[in-house]
Image (cartoon, helix red, strand yellow):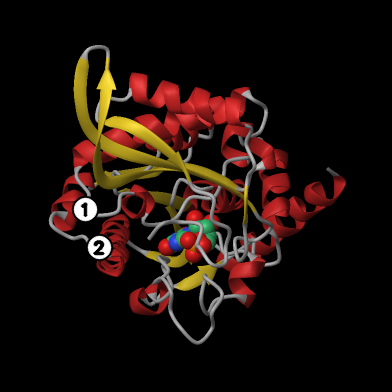
Amino acid sequence: DWTMAEFRKTKIAEIREQVGSSRVICGLSGGVDSAVAAVLIHEAIGDQLTCVFVDHGLMRMGEAEQVVSLFRNHYNIPLVHKDVSALFLGGLAGVTDPEAKRKFIGKTFIDVFEAEAKQVGGADFLAQGTLYPDVIESVSFTGGPSVTIKSHHNVGGLPERMNMKLVEPLRELFKDEVRALGRELGLPEIFVGRHPFPGPGLAIRIPGEVTRERCDILRKADAIYLEEIRNAGLYDAIWQAFAVLLPVKTVGVMGDFRTYDSVCALRAVTSTDGMTADIYPFDAGFLSRVATRIVNEVKGINRVVYDYTSKPPGTIEWE
Ligand code: XMP
């Protein structure tokens, strides 16, 4: 892609000019934006960059491992991997209110990141994968500018608090352009084409109390659903697809036995920016195949339902 090849060259020169010989810290979220920003900056300034991955243990199946292996093995970029799942799950114990979950996760994330950044030491710059829509839409994520529908998890106040300057090489780009740049930089397709994932992770896809066990159950169901979507060739036609583990148990029957287990809801939407969304109209055969696999393969789930709500009036995530 000629445009992205040009963009890459221009940005590399700009980053070098801005940063000089200073050190830069970049927080990785596991998502496309921060990964592309980090790889681009590393190309510009090499080991003046340190990446910090605060691993809250609320990622999808295999994702934390993928981030670590991409940076350490594929790109050889210095990476601090901070596994703080115990801290996050401990703090989430007994928390059921969606906003309380979001606030706890946002605050804890910033605390951990800040402490790690201090450990790295001596960095004047903080790198972020901010995109153009984040720049123009920095008010509220869910659309209603006058009401906060969900506290958005990001690192908003961090640079001032840490007294650091920002490096934001993706500020002019839209999501599809970031994906094109990621491909230009050689990021694997599985990373570049990945559906968006919310900062608070699986915690907001487990209404009610979040436990390690429920995270594991949800991860398995979600992985089966995504695998079937990829196999059906539908992944790229969908903006986001994910499973939600409900705090509701229902009665079922497996062989000759009564079961009493959780309900799993499946969500899939099309969208261009996440502000509005339509449900993805799977055919019945697809949905029943996924439901059968999840109930047969995931211990703890005995019923699967499909969410038919568009946004508005529903939001994409359940919390
Ligand atoms: P909702 O649920 O508000 O989600 O319709 C709209 C889009 O935003 C994502 N989302 C988040 N992304 N931090 C993020 O980085 C968050 O706290 C957050 N909450 C929701 C959601 O996945 C969807 O793409």
Quadrant housing the C terminus: bottom left
What separation in Å lies between label 2 and label 1 (alpha carbons)?
A: 8 Å
According to the picture, the residue beneath numbered tag 1 turns out to be 88
Residue under the image location 48 percent in, 40 percent down = 77
The one nearer the camera, 41 or 190, is: 190
Total numbered labels placed on residues in the image:
2
Quadrant housing the N terminus: top right
The one nearer the camera, 275 or 66, is: 275
On the question of residue 185 being in view, the answer is no
Vertical position of residue 76 compared to residue 12: above or below: above
Residue with the most extreme bottom position: 146
Left or right side of 231 for 267: left
The response on whether ligand 1 sits within 8 Å of label 2 is no
Is disc 2 in contact with disc 1, using a CB cutoff of under 8 Å?
Answer: yes
The one nearer the camera, 15 or 183, is: 183
Rendering quarter of residue 286: top right
According to the picture, the residue beneath numbered tag 2 turns out to be 108
- Image coordinates of residue 216 in percent, x first then y, are 27, 34
Local secondary structure at mark 2: helix
- Image coordinates of residue 89 in percent, x first then y, are 19, 49
Rendering quarter of residue 277: bottom right
Q: Quick one: label 2, few (<14), some, or many (20+) residues within 10 Å?
A: some
- Image coordinates of residue 248 in percent, x first then y, are 25, 46
On the question of residue 7 being in view, the answer is yes
Q: Which mark is residue 286?
A: none
Residue under the image location 19 percent in, 23 percent down = 258
- Image coordinates of residue 47 in percent, x first then y, are 48, 47
The kind of residue tagged 2 is Thr
Residue under the image location 28 percent in, 56 percent down = 116
Local secondary structure at mark 1: helix
Q: Quick one: label 1, few (<14), some, or many (20+) residues within 10 Å?
A: many
The kind of residue tagged 1 is Phe
